[in-house]
Amino acid sequence: MSDGPLSGKLALVTGASRGIGRAVADRLYAAGAHVVRLARSLTDGSTERRTDLRCDVTDPAAVDRAAARVLAELGVPDVVVNNAGTFFIKRIEETSLEEFTRTLAVNLTGPFLVVRAFVPHLVQRGAGHLVTIGSVSDHVAYSGSTAYAASKYGLRGMHEVLRQDLSRTGVRTTLVSPGPVDTPIWDPVDPDSKPGFTKRSAMLQAEDIAAAVLYAVTQAPRVDVTEIRLMPTVYTARG
Ligand SMILES: NC(=O)c1ccc[n+]([C@@H]2O[C@H](COP(=O)([O-])OP(=O)(O)OC[C@H]3O[C@@H](n4cnc5c(N)ncnc54)[C@H](OP(=O)(O)O)[C@@H]3O)[C@@H](O)[C@H]2O)c1
């Protein structure tokens, strides 16, 4: 067992195969937690303090299977990070129904399914921490981000209700809302080639978000860090 601040704790991170999720998983692992990583491209496997599960968070049966396996083999997680997400920029008239529903499925239904699977166990234990990776797009409107904004504003709404519903249970909830972070999510957009976008070199790094998550989940039990907003120090209004 390690001697970090999360020693003996169990953490689960969705969308942990790359980008912010992978950085969060690495940071929680470095702090001593046993870390369960979920993503579609991961292969099932376990080593000491690391468990990978292949899971599409939009598939209710797959989420329930993954949750049942975690609960049976590792126990009730202390930290659950809903991070898996997808992003594109298109005006509403160019957005297909499939693109819209897919964005809601990954960014909103996925966290719903994950929280639903674990929250009764966290409440029964009277402790635990639900971390939601939102976005600056959960409170600021960016032109062309119709589907993404719908999903992230919705996710913030779900976080607010959860926070209220869980306020007497000992379960904590934190919404982490970053501005642009240099991860593969930006590859199709190629912001460096487009005027008005924050250049990738000026963006936040995935490790910055991981540090915010670690801060939230390592406070004294009496402290509920309800929301953390992070922006690059130098950025353009477009994101
Ligand atoms: N990068 C930014 O500028 C930024 C800013 C604010 C908020 N965010 C949010 O941060 C989160 C992570 O974004 P990122 O930038 O790290 O993106 P990323 O590099 O594209 O990584 C996305 C992660 O989500 C996983 N994922 C996607 N669809 C999934 C599904 N159906 N089931 C399970 N896992 C799925 C991917 O793994 P697989 O493909 O292996 O499934 C991958 O691990 C997202 O919620 C995003 O909205 C990002």
Image (cartoon, helix red, strand yellow):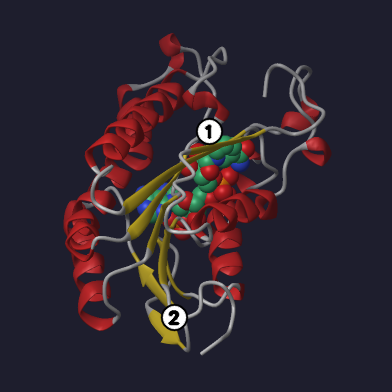
Is residue 86 shown above or below 198? below
Residue at image mark 2:
8
Secondary-structure class at tag 1 = loop
Residue 135 bears which disc, if any? 1
Q: Residue at x 42, y 29 (%)?
A: 152
Q: Residue at x 68, y 18 (%)?
A: 238
For ligand 1, tell me if the residue under mark 1 lies within 8 Å: yes
Residue type of the residue flagged with mark 2 = Gly
Q: Residue at x 17, y 62 (%)?
A: 124
Q: Would residue 238 be found to the left or right of residue 1 on screen?
A: right
Q: Nearer the viewer, mark 2 or mark 1?
A: 2
Q: Would residue 67 be found to the left or right of residue 32 on screen?
A: left
Q: Quadrant of residue 97?
A: top left
**Residue 89: image x %, image y %?**
54, 23
Q: Residue at x 22, y 54 (%)?
A: 119
**Residue 228: image x %, image y %?**
56, 38
Q: Closest to the observer: 125 or 16?
A: 125
Q: Would residue 109 be found to the left or right of residue 26 on screen?
A: left
**Residue 102: image x %, image y %?**
33, 35
Comes first in the chain, label 2 or label 1: 2
Is residue 22 shown above or below 130? below
**Residue 136: image x %, image y %?**
56, 28
- Tell me whether the residue at label 2 lies in contact with that at label 1, contact meaning CB atoms closer than 8 angstroms: no
